[in-house]
Image (cartoon, grey):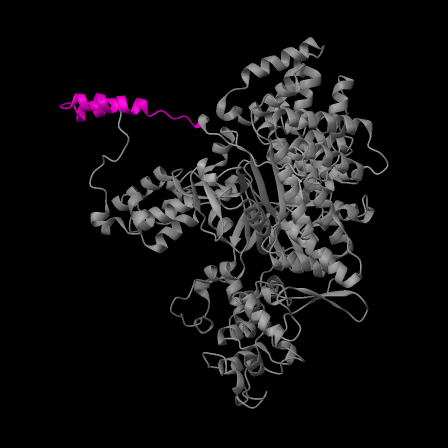
Amino acid sequence: VLTCLREGCTIDRIGTRALANGERRLKGAADMARLYRHHPAALRRSVEIATRCSFDLSELSYEYPDEGRDGQTPQQRLERLTRAGLDRRYPGGVPDPVRALAEKEIGLVGQLGFAAYFLTVHDIVRFARARGILCQGRGSAANSIICYALGITDVGPEVITMVFERFISEHRGEPPDIDVDFEHERREEVIQHIYERYGRDRAGLCATVIHFRTRAAIREVGKAMGLSADLTAALAGQIWGQSDKGPETARIRELGLDLADPRLAQTVALIREIIGFPRHLSQHVGGFVITRGRLDALCPIENAAMEDRTVIEWDKDDIDALGILKVDILSLGMLTCIRKCFDLIEAHDGHRPAIATVPQGDAATYDMLCRADAVGVFQVESRAQMNFLPRMKPREFYDLVIEVAIVRPGPIQGGMVHPYINRRQGRETVSFPSEALRAVLGKTLGVPLFQEQAMQIAVVAAGFSPSEADRLRRSMATFRRMGTIGELRERFIRGMLERGYEQGFAESCFGQIEGFGEYGFPESHAAAFAMLAYVSAWLKCHHPAAFACALLNSQPMGFYAPAQIVRDAREHRVEVRPICVNASDWDNRLERRMDGALALRLGFRQIKGLREEDAGWIVAARGNGYPDPASLWRRAGLRPDALERLAEADAFAGIGLARRDALWQVKAIRAPETLPLFDDPIDGEAIREPRVDLPPMHLGQEVVEDYVATRLTLRAHPMELLRPHLPGLTPHDRLSDVQTGARAPRVTICGLVITRQRPGTASGVIFLTLEDETGVGNVVVWPRVHARFRAAVMGGRLLRVRGRLQREGIVVHLIAEEIEDRSADLARLGHPDDRALEQTTARNDDVPRHLKPAPRPGARHPREQAKRLFPSRDFH
């Protein structure tokens, strides 16, 4: 089968391309002795030669580039830049504790010989900022005062407790790892700068080994075994997310497939066997290895699939094991969004904000977050985060640090969430058995939430050295796989007992940090992300039009699709204007209204299938505007298919052409190429299409065609049209008005599925977000309900859900009991006969024949059509 995958053929057609036998494998000594039993001398001689061919990877000599300049060594240059950076950070004078911390770090960096590494990252960040590319360090590097002084990170010791040993430890025997995020649309500029500075013979990206996951295994093994495309698609469609469990027998039977079929049974067995096999070598997301000499003298290299990139054939684990320094050049969509938002504010309001100058402690921003008004806000826009915000009620920056970190697998698995929120809301007393632990856990109300706190507890309460505490942290991160924590547990509890703590408290303390250790968040990382969360929230609060525009122009990114971003902008009183051939650019842009407010004009980038190059020609040749599609074709030189996409997106409405009329005129343009330069006729002289009276499209058709062309609509929400034909539904904005007593009331809601989530920490629970014309509703699907309505939960685009209402504060959930897939109703919205909507309460098979359009070749089932028109974003 693997040969078939490599050769791109089925097993029935592999022929002579198959291996001649099964001997192509590494054989043991017994097998070799048996094969060469008549030539024992040859075998002995081979062993002697192999023994003499000795090589050990530890013999490789890795030298980092020398970043010294102006006669200074790298260490001297780092010391100078660090002290100068601290003076800039603290213009009123560097506090003594900060200066002492910096001197301690500088000494350890010099001792370990890592100065050049810090300088490399500093130079890369300086290059990016000189080009106007937003960037920010994150992860454990934010524990370094050197990184803060050099401008690599922006979180200072006033915000977090910097635990340098979390970043670098003299006993760890590993190089430091600095992760820097850059704007996702401009990261390639930074990558090419590194290649230009060091050369492709000295710089390369790490590799990563891609393994077969279940969906890929089903598709590829199914193809190799000769299964039909429909069958493999059906099998793959039964898999949720990135599962590694293989197709389940029960799910296969649900599809009506017979596992007694030998070919199918063998295929399923092979699928399960191949899951986890290496599939191919790919690029690491951004890990650069840079050498002083030639890279190929250190490791094997190859050209990447992307142009102008070199990849080394070792992955990050290989690099770490060999002690080779790696610079992580990562991308982050929110940085792109923030920079574009700053650009828009500067262009329309005359001043340019910066991350460092955004007003801190803004009450309106925190009020917005307390209402869970966070669509588009970095790190707190998921339904889980938005459900937690009203309980958390953040009022200062460190509250956001906790918010970012607490809705994570580590604190959830460690049982920290409920104790923390109970203490924050005054339902549980906060107490500390010692002042030492108060100093460590005071900011988190006695609940350990961060990796740094686990290390500090080990130091102040159990007598660990900082390096030993780092070893404890690393052991907790791997104990489920390696089982290496027993000795440290005994040492930890013994140390606490020796310092006067009670046995029960010591065991409880260790149990807490053990529970979240594998997935715990570094406080430094949470603080770096919280800074972007606050900035994005401030922009959304005070510049909603610019923020929504920047968010749309930065897609794909984030949690929500453009349709939800546009809906949210309109809810914040932002006027959203449609795509127009005479007003739109490629990007979405802002327009000044008569009252001085800013409106959001949708751009050509929202039209599916339209190229940016085509949009450029439209804008360049527009002049005083296009009177009709023919003049657009002549002046901009667009191909007929590009004109059709504009017409389908209703982009000619601004010049008085309805969608059908525009399509009629566009269809009259049949020229395969643009007209010769000097033969262009004057506008209005060439194409004279006779006027016809086309029947207007009803609203349902317009809505469906909007989604077909742009995946959003500025007209009615589909549920607004369907609601009269679906009785007994509670609008989403009325759920909070439903009275809940001792017994939760039952209600029924219906809406488009905009997100599905199945967190690994939720014990199989699925969270659905449904949207109707009034807002969004949160649905909780327990495993037993999921088992009954699995097809609807996984594949439905319009769901009707009946269940019991659950309320906590302003957060309302519907605990699903019955789920019905109503996706076929969405397809009927676009039926030429608007009476089709009246049939939404009937099954599709019961719809009168005169309302069923004649099937077209390749026509899709209404539910399949709905999946393409109204896609959801699913997270696992």
Quadrant of the frame with the N terminus: top left
Q: Residue at x 66, y 79 (%)?
A: 623
Q: How many marks?
A: 0
> 109 or 248: nearer the eye?
109
Q: Position of residue 849 (x, y in %)?
A: 43, 71
Q: Is residue 850 visible?
A: yes
> 752 or 298: nearer the eye?
298
Q: Residue at x 67, y 80 (%)?
A: 624
What stretch of residues is rendered in magenta? 29-57
Above or below, 538 against 171 in this view is below
In the image: residue 854, left or right of residue 38: right
Q: Position of residue 736 (x, y in %)?
A: 71, 49
Residue 586 falls inside the magenta stretch: no
In this view, which residue lies farthest toward the right? Answer: 92
Q: Residue at x 69, y 21 (%)?
A: 457
Q: Is residue 841 visible?
A: no
Q: Position of residue 13 (x, y in %)?
A: 23, 52
Figure quadrant of residue 160: top right
In the image: residue 528, left or right of residue 705: right
In this view, which residue lies farthest toward the left? Answer: 38
Q: Position of residue 412 (x, y in %)?
A: 62, 32
Above or below, 176 against 557 in this view is above
Q: Residue at x 69, y 22 (%)?
A: 456
Residue 32 falls inside the magenta stretch: yes
> 190 or 563: nearer the eye?
190
> 237 or 104: nearer the eye?
104
Figure quadrant of residue 403: top right
Main structural element of the magenta stretch: helix, strand or loop?
Answer: helix
Above or below, 713 against 245 in this view is below
